[in-house]
Amino acid sequence: MILSSLKDYVHENALSRTVADVRIGLCYTAVLLDNGAAGVAYTFRHDIPPGRTCCFQRAGPLAGKKAEEITQHITSPDLLERTMGIATANALININRDEFIEGDTLKQLKPGKDDVVGMVGYFGPIVPKLKAAVKELFIFEKVSGRSEEVYPEVKAFEMLPSCTVAIITSTTLINGTLGKLLSASKNCKKVALVGASTPLAKEVFSSFGIDILSGAIITDPPAILQIVSEGGGMRSFKGLIRKVNLVCNT
């Protein structure tokens, strides 16, 4: 339902736009529109079936297609197609608006000493701040080997109901787990969807119990497309994006 709502929301914005360029990188997928705006979404390269070499194998060149055609794939069962659709959605809607708030997401969440925070996805820069500010922090992540104790991602469904604040990576929108995670977080007083893949559309996400959207506005699209093509990720995006927050529910 979340992806369907997102697809419906971006439909009108997509009608007048055309895709100018597409890059499917090892870490991110980037889409550039004919108006110069760009968006990204995380590439789950390890989950691509063996032998899969193309996103739209029978569709021909992506550049020149109507954005509306690509955003139809937001609800595709195919992971790469879905990634492309969400990257296009982000190019359409993640543009400067007065309601965006720059700065640390935690300033909007305001976690306190009595809070138990569940973090789905490892957001290294805010981990020390959270540990110093809250009662307990649980981190759920697919990748092991972090310095902090990290629980397997599947434990999130079991442990989030006991948390008071949830911080969820927007890559869960791409891999299809966001709905279940939001259900597990329904007792949390605050829920944030965080990451460069986040579509900044409170009209979509507020009704699903998300209070804060934290995402990215790309300020240098050509540089971002080159970085994506060369396999770069978020660390390489520094100085080329604006990290902004959007309050959905107060």
Image (cartoon, rainbow, N blue to C red):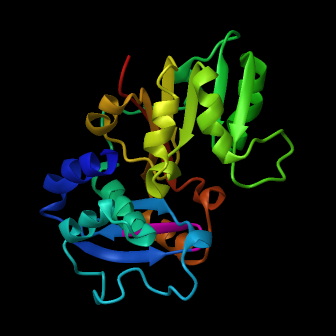
Whether residue 149 sits left or right of residue 199 in the image: it is right
Number of numbered discs: 0
Depth order, front residue of 234/9: 9
Looking at the figure, which quarter contains the N terminus?
A: top left
Would you say residue 213 is visible in this rendering? yes
Would you say residue 95 is visible in this rendering? no
- Which residue is drawn at the image coordinates 44% and 85% (left, top)? 54
Q: Return the x and y of residue 146 as percentages of the image width and height.
A: 82, 48
- Which residue is drawn at the image coordinates 59% and 67% (left, top)? 27
Q: Return the x and y of residue 13 as percentages of the image width and height.
A: 17, 54
Q: Is residue 85 above or below residue 94?
A: below
Whether residue 161 sits left or right of residue 16 in the image: it is right
Q: Does 29 appear in magenta? A: yes
Depth order, front residue of 66/152: 152
List the single residue furthest toward the right. Answer: 147
- Which residue is drawn at the image coordinates 22% and 78% (left, top)? 65
List the single residue furthest toward the front. Answer: 158
Which SS type dominates the magenta stretch?
strand
Q: Which residues are magenta?
A: 26-31
- Which residue is drawn at the image coordinates 62% and 68% (left, top)? 232
Q: Return the x and y of residue 246 as percentages of the image width and height.
A: 39, 32
Q: Is residue 218 above or below residue 61?
A: above
Q: Return the x and y of residue 37 as percentages of the image width and height.
A: 32, 61
